[in-house]
Amino acid sequence: NYLSGTIPTEISSLPSLNSVYLHHNRLSGIIPSFQSAKLEVLTLSHNSFHGIEYPWRVEDLDKNHNHNEEEEYSLNIFDASYNSIKGTISENIGILSKLTVFNLSYNKFHGTVPTSI
């Protein structure tokens, strides 16, 4: 595909979103924090993203009325490889107990790998 621009807030805020396949496009900007606790697959590789709002921020669990304390994130595949993402990897990654694939290769991260991985 040749999709360009950013991921619209309307997509990232869909409460029942299960899968997002937007790899191999020309998307840019910051990967938004997806609000759906039902999200299982998020593939955003081979784009031009330069930043990320982690979709598993602990703060979102408290702020978002779609979540409750018993609800767990369902994300098991997260691939944002081959972008230009800068920064560090969130320590909150440990709350993704169902995560089986986590690929951030070929980006511009710095710092240490979180101990929660």
Image (cartoon, grey):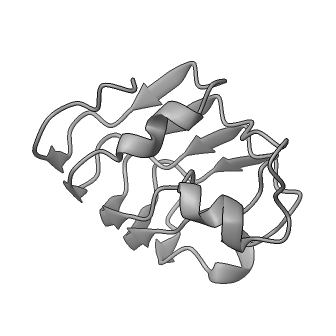
Q: What residue appears at the point 69 percent right and 73 percent down from the top-left corner? A: 63
**Image height of 107 relative to 35, above or below:** above
**Image height of 58 relative to 64, above or below:** above
**Front one among 59 and 12:** 59
Tell me where residue 109 appears, x and y as whole percent: 16, 47
Q: What residue appears at the point 53 percent right and 56 percent down from the top-left corner? A: 57
Quarter of the image with the N terminus in it: bottom right
Q: What residue appears at the point 49 percent right and 65 percent down from the top-left corner? A: 2
**Image height of 72 relative to 7, above or below:** above
**Image height of 27 relative to 75, above or below:** below
Q: Tell me the quarter of the picture where residue 47 sits.
A: bottom left
Left-right relation of 51 to 108? right
Quarter of the image with the C terminus in it: top left
Q: What residue appears at the point 73 percent right and 72 percent down from the top-left corner? A: 13
Tell me where residue 16 appears, x and y as whole percent: 89, 57
Tell me if I can see residue 23 in this picture: yes
**Front one among 3 and 63:** 63
Left-right relation of 28 to 41? left
Tell me if I can see residue 80 in this picture: no
Left-right relation of 5 to 22? left
Q: How many marks?
A: 0
Tell me where residue 56 appears, x and y as whole percent: 57, 51
